[in-house]
Image (spheres, rainbow, N blue to C red):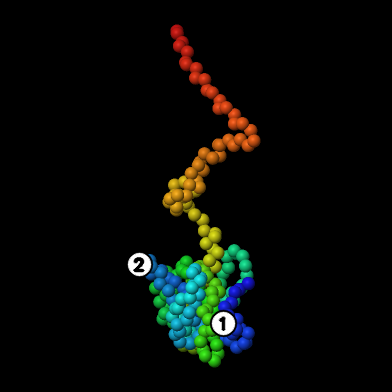
Amino acid sequence: MRSLDSATRAALQSGRLVGRNFFRVGGKNRSTGVPEYLNLWNDVGVVDAPVTDVETGTTVVYTFTGSGTLVSVDNVPLTMGVDVRMLKVALSNISATVINLVRGYDVKNGTAQIWRGLFDPESRNLVAAATSRFVGFVDKCVINDPPIPLDGKGMPTGSVTLTIASHTRELTRASTEKRSNESQKRRAANDLFYKDAGVVGSWQVFWGQERAAPSQTVVVPPRNFYY
């Protein structure tokens, strides 16, 4: 069940709202390796919109560019579970900003977030900070550049499509780290969970009885053989 703030609840009860999608995607700078982000929305112009940070729960403001940059977003199913879900986001292939990101930066595994904002049709303002609808990583980027007809007839149409995998994909990631006392202490110096992991399997535990006396080993000196 989704929790709504009082402003959003009152606006929904009025029945007069305009919904818009906000999309943020990161691409790794090929020179520095530092991620840089592009913010888009499916309306006209540039807008500074407050959105809810999915990690901290606080409200942050990003500048989103519109005017056809964000073409479409697949419907986000509001379901529970840890299954990895895939979502497609279509971007404009004629936007210089979009092309610079997908061609100039490495968007593979880049962070992607989708928010849904509700506008008051009279004031044209958001009734509250846009709420998070989907968080994940770029799984695939497909750039479709159709050839221009030789006869000059017709208008070729291209597309830029990002396939986003939900953040639950992190649960499927395998780690090469070995489960050992040393690796555990690198994570937390005082964590001794794996201290006796290598020998605990040979321990004998005595429940409700006296511990048996240890067996004694008699060492027999070697005989001297004479020929």
Tally the numbered discs.
2
Extreme residue in the top direction: 227
The C terminus - image quarter: top left
Secondary structure, mark 2, is loop
Q: Nearer the viewer, residue 12 or 91?
A: 12
Q: Is residue 134 above or below residue 207?
A: below
Nearer mark to the viewer, of 1 and 2: 1
Residue 45 vs residue 84: left or right?
A: left
The residue shown at (48%, 44%) is: 195
Does the CB distance between marks 1 and 2 fall below 8 Å?
no
Question: Which dot marks residue 103?
Answer: none
Residue 126 appears at what percent x and percent y? 52, 84
Q: Nearer the viewer, residue 148 or 24?
A: 24
Residue 20 appears at what percent x and percent y? 54, 82
The N terminus - image quarter: bottom right
Disc 1 residue type? Ala
Q: Nearer the viewer, residue 185 or 137?
A: 185
Q: Is residue 84 above or below residue 63?
A: above
Q: Is residue 116 above or below residue 15?
A: above
Extreme residue in the left direction: 31
Question: Which dot marks residue 32?
Answer: 2
Going from N to C along the chain, the mark reached first, 1 or 2, is 1
Residue 30 appears at what percent x and percent y? 37, 68
Q: Is residue 23 above or below residue 153?
A: above
Extreme residue in the right direction: 208
The residue shown at (55%, 90%) is: 121
The residue shown at (54%, 40%) is: 200
The residue shown at (46%, 76%) is: 60
The residue at which mark 1 appears reads as 7
Q: Is residue 88 visible?
A: no
